[in-house]
Image (tube, helix red, strand yellow):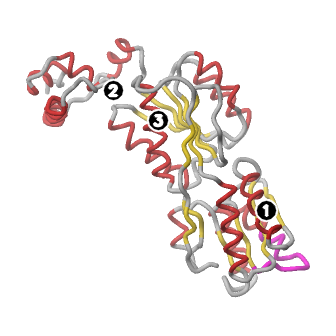
Amino acid sequence: MKRATQKDVATLARVSQAAVSMVLSGGDVSSVSPDTLARIQQAVRHLGYVPNRAAQALKTNRTMTVACIVPDIANPFYPSLMRGIQTVLESESYDVIAINTDGAPAREKRFLEWLRQGRVDGVIGVFWAVRAPEFAPLVEVGMPIVRIESSRKSGGPFAIDDIYVDGRAAAHEVTTYLVGKGHRHIAMIAGQGGPESVRVEGYRAAVTTAGLPARVVVDDVFTEEGGFRAASALLEGDLRPTAIFAANDLMAIGAMQAIQARGLSIPSDVAVVGFDDIRASSFVSPPLTTVAQYQGAIGMKAAELLMERLSGRKSGAGTVTEMPFQLIERSSA
């Protein structure tokens, strides 16, 4: 069966091939009327048109590919984030490739070098180690960069767009919520790196305001195993906490396992709160109280910002976008 071409789309839509090329290449379509755009899209669907990526790359000097860099692809938070990114970019005929760094500085820097080889047109990433100045070589060659952050940002001179959820404010709200529930021995567990510092900072500020002592145990990793180890250290101490706030849901689930393994009840003996609202958090027993970050929405916003740069609709200095969070109350606290 003959593969449909842009000429076939133009003929069926009764428009010029130049208009079809502009729409399908992800360019600025502000000069294309809504009626023309609708006819082109209808013709594409009817013909089952699929872009010839190799020819497109030669013509436009673009790969039509975007890299999504994350620290732990096994953490359920990130597939949901990437789903949001993919939803937007696929509608613009871009493919998404996922890259896992394990949050290791050496791996993050290695992938920055890989990006400089021109294998992708843009990058959306969660970076735990590299800082804005290290992106300078990519910015200089015009590669759009969107970073997803865990703390408040104020912008800077580089053309890097930042999206963040205020992790400090969210952690402060969780801790204040537990204080309001009557808890006076609230501990926190976290993994090392990434969002650890800002979330612990929010927790410490809240317990200090309440006149309570801070107890923090930091494990090497943000996983169930890390949560189990960190919670076990707290439970085996001289003063058992009445509430444990975990810096992510995987650690919270590990903490719940440690509590239940000791024959203790959640939340009557020890309350547990997580962070992220991954899908599993509503299915564990008891269902986990946690902080929703709406990672799908974050991914979609990140992709929209990237497309604004790729299409030329936006240029100049970077922007900062704050995204919402919400405390989701369930039965674990």
Can you tell which of label 3 and label 1 is closer to the viewer? 1
Q: Amino acid at mark 2?
A: Gly
Chain part drawn in magenta:
231-242
- In the image, 66: left or right of 21? right
Question: Is residue 175 depicted above or below 19 in this figure?
Answer: below
Q: Magenta stretch: residue 60 in it?
A: no
Judged from the image, the secondary structure of the residue bearing numbered disc 3 is helix
What residue do we see at 76% from left, 82% from top? 262
Residue 293 location, quadrant: bottom right
Disc 2 secondary structure class: loop
Residue 26 is tagged as 2
Residue 321 placement: quadrant: top right
Where is mark 1, residue-wise? Answer: 205
Q: Position of residue 248 (x, y in %)?
A: 65, 60
Q: Is residue 237 magenta?
A: yes
Given residues 59 and 134, the one toward you in this image is 134
What residue did someone put label 3 on?
305
Amino acid type of the residue tagged 3 in the rendering: Leu
| Residue found at x 77% / y 57% | 201
Side of 304 relative to 22 (left or right): right
Mark 2 and mark 3: Cα distance apart in space:
14 Å
